[in-house]
Image (cartoon, helix red, strand yellow):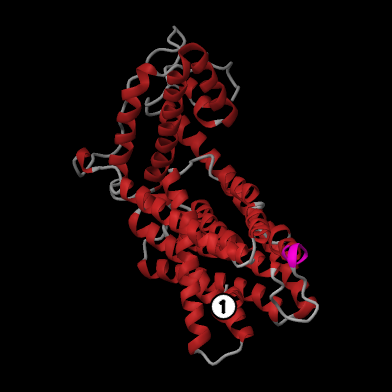
Amino acid sequence: MVRLVALIGTLEPPVSPSHPRVERVSVYPPVTAPRSRYRPQRGRLVLVVLTWITAVLGAVAAVFFAAQAGDVPGATLAVVFALFPLPLVLWAYWWLDRVEPEPFRYKGAAFVWGAVVAVAISLALESAASIWLDVSDEVLTAVVAPIVEESAKGAFLVLTLLRARRIIDGVLDGLIVSGLVAIGFAAVENLGYYAVSYLGIGDGPQQLAGPGGATATFVVRGLFSPFAHPLFTSAIGIAMGLAVGRRSRTVRILLMIGGLLTSILLHALWNGSLVIGGGVGFLLVYLVLAALLVGLGVLAIVLRQGQLTTLWKSLSYAASYRGWLHPAEVPFLVSFSRRRAARTYAKIHRGKPGAKTVQEYQRLATRLGFLHDQVMRGKAPADGVDRVYAVLDAMDAIRPQVLLPPALPPGMR
């Protein structure tokens, strides 16, 4: 970003003899606080409004960045190049978040924070650093920019933990939230780089300009490194995911600091290879970061599969031992293909409202599964038991309108 600053500066289950209605049986320890203590998260409307306002301001800023190209064709090309990688990278994080999807308002806020707030903070601080610090542009790019940018992106995760802790309750959630923040940041940053590349601003007399210059920058930033910023910031996300499971405040703080420092180091390696390392240095760092990205992808997939396993075990236990569900429901609440088949079945028999009711029942069951697992493992928040009962109440309220397909043959999932 500092280089950019410088450049711009210039359910119902089938009821049959084999499927009797089951009554809920609670075998949790006595609840120490009244169940009315649990309340949904407040401030939803405020979050939505602030996100939309910030998004509009960001759109205005994006126009400013694109305008640095100097003319309409250049600005259009910069916008197209900036938007081109977004479907792929956003789909990757949507896929990771399918098991227990978080509310869209939080995911939207994460993206907008990265694209607008983090960019604004970075521009302001890096501009000030370029004026007040007596260091070279290379040092600003390789040292100052990583510190400022990763801190600005990581601030959203800290605020999320303080304001809505349940959004990040594990490493995978940390990866998803940090990734969305970084995607937003990269999109706007790249937009500016494509615009100034169109003008040919850069080092050396042979600097490309026009469509050739913007395309050359797009190949490096949009095709070969679209996951660069998500990789850097993932270190903060992993640290946050680990921190929420620790009781010691000191350990939590150390994990967060370690995550931030790792994020800064990865970013500094990348930036340093671009401005200091030369061709060979850049290639070596690129290969190292590519290997880390592959490892991160494998970790994310393993964690996602672990979520499915946890959900299956938790809901099966809730059905077989607690009587909260009928065992025949479980496949239609866990498997993605069975979930979809259940919604289709409900839509055929009861129309769109029936499908929406099944979808809501599935969402609540997912929440129940993970909350129940946390309580049984002693990892739930103080009002974890209350939250479980609140979700059960919500499921009971819509259960008479829920229609699921006939039970699967024994042994099938």
Q: Give the quarter of the image for residue 5.
A: bottom right
Q: Quadrant of the C terminus?
A: top right
Residue 379 vs 372, above or below: the answer is: below
Residue 37 in the magenta stretch? The answer is: no
| Residue 89 in sight from this viewpoint | yes
Q: Main secondary structure of the magenta part?
A: helix
| Residue 241 in sight from this viewpoint | no
Residue under the point 42% across and 29% down:
360
- Could you say where residue 320 lies in the image, as x and y percent from the top left? 43, 26
Q: Is residue 249 left or right of residue 309?
A: left
Residue 340 vs 187, above or below: the answer is: above
Q: Amino acid at mark 1?
A: Gly
Q: Is residue 222 left or right of residue 280?
A: left
Residue 356 vs 252, above or below: the answer is: above
- Could you say where residue 77 lies in the image, as x and y percent from the top left? 68, 57
Q: Quadrant of the N terminus?
A: bottom right
Residue 139 vs 210, above or below: the answer is: below
The magenta segment: 210-214
Secondary structure, mark 1, is helix
- Could you say where residue 19 lies in the image, as x and y percent from the top left? 44, 12
Q: Is residue 43 left or right of residue 338?
A: left
Residue under the point 53% across and 27% down:
339
* Residue for badge 1: 9
Q: Give the quarter of the image for residue 295.
A: bottom right
